[in-house]
Image: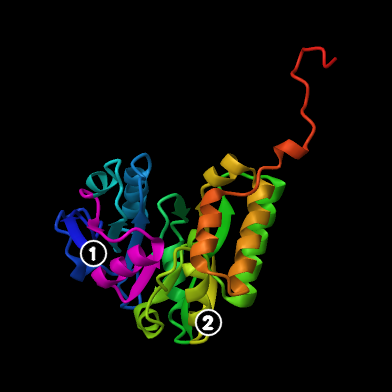
Amino acid sequence: MSTALGNGNGNGNGNGGGDSSSSSGSGGGLRVSIIVPVLDEAETIQSTLRRLRADFPGCELVVVDGGSTDGTAALAAPLASVLTAPRGRGSQLNAGARHASGDVLWFHHADTAADPTALGQLMAVLADPRVVGGGLRLRFERRSPGLDYLAWASNHRARRLGWIFGDQAMFVRRTAFEAVDGFPELPLMEDLEISRRLRRLGRMAVLPATCTASTRRFQRHGTWAMVLFMQYLKALYLAGRDPAAIHRRYLAGPPRLTGFLPRRPARGRNPA
């Protein structure tokens, strides 16, 4: 069950009314709703929402809070329609979809940034009725061999298999979203599973526009450790392992390898 907390200027048009009936994209007669699931994003939520309003002013903007304790919902309220839902990305995204009025549901993570050209490309690709949804080309806010590889592999997989993950700003026609009963109520891999279901209905497109993702989790655990860890978790899911157990493993983070590596001597000190 979701609860509406407030209706800020959710259509982002500067009129202060949050009239979702005017939420439309930039062509084709399709209305686009941007849905942002959040949990304790006080540091970034206002800058994220201001950017979305500036870059995509015709879109309805809905924030779904999963029980933040840092004031995220209150900070978002002047800038978007805000509601609460049980914690969990699938639960929050489904609540946002039910609340939104758009013909196209466009899901954004709070720590990602979509290129302003994305909306026009989205509307153009949806002119083809065979396209049921898709996402943006992934890039990261900083570069390294590991991150470059992960972005390349994610984009290649999306083009070949139609698997779109949350940090690629997935979009989907509402009709297709409802046909697959929305996101599965999973603690993890909800984006992978809905992509697989949507792919059976039609084509999943990857736009040339980029979605720039945060690297904060990679910085915390190490890039290659996280790359290998996420592939391991996907393999567990595809092998049919319990999603709740996979989620617990995800929260624990990748195994620490520092105990197996020789320590580097402190700079300027005699290693003897």
**Image quadrant for the N terminus?**
bottom left
Residue drawn at x 30%, y 40% is: 70
**Image quadrant for the C terminus?**
top right
- For the record, the magenta segment spans 77-106
Q: Where is residue 8 in the image (x, y as percent from the top left)?
A: 19, 53
Q: In this rendering, is residue 130 above or below 151? A: below
Tell me: 141 left or right of 145. Answer: left
Label at residue 2: 1
Q: What residue type is labelled 2?
A: Arg
On the image, numbered disc 2 is attached to which residue? Answer: 199
Tell me: 219 left or right of 187. Answer: right
Q: Where is residue 56 in the image (x, y as percent from the top left)?
A: 35, 59
* Mark in front: 1 vs 2: 1
First reached walking from the N terminus: tag 1 or tag 2: 1
Is residue 135 visible to the viewer in this orientation of the structure?
no
Q: What colour scheme has been applied to the protein in the rendered image?
A: rainbow
Q: Position of residue 191 (x, y in %)?
A: 48, 68
The mark total stands at 2
Asked if the residue at tag 2 contacts the one at tag 1, i.e. Cβ–Cβ closer than 8 Å, the answer is: no
Helix or strand or loop: what does disc 1 sit on? loop
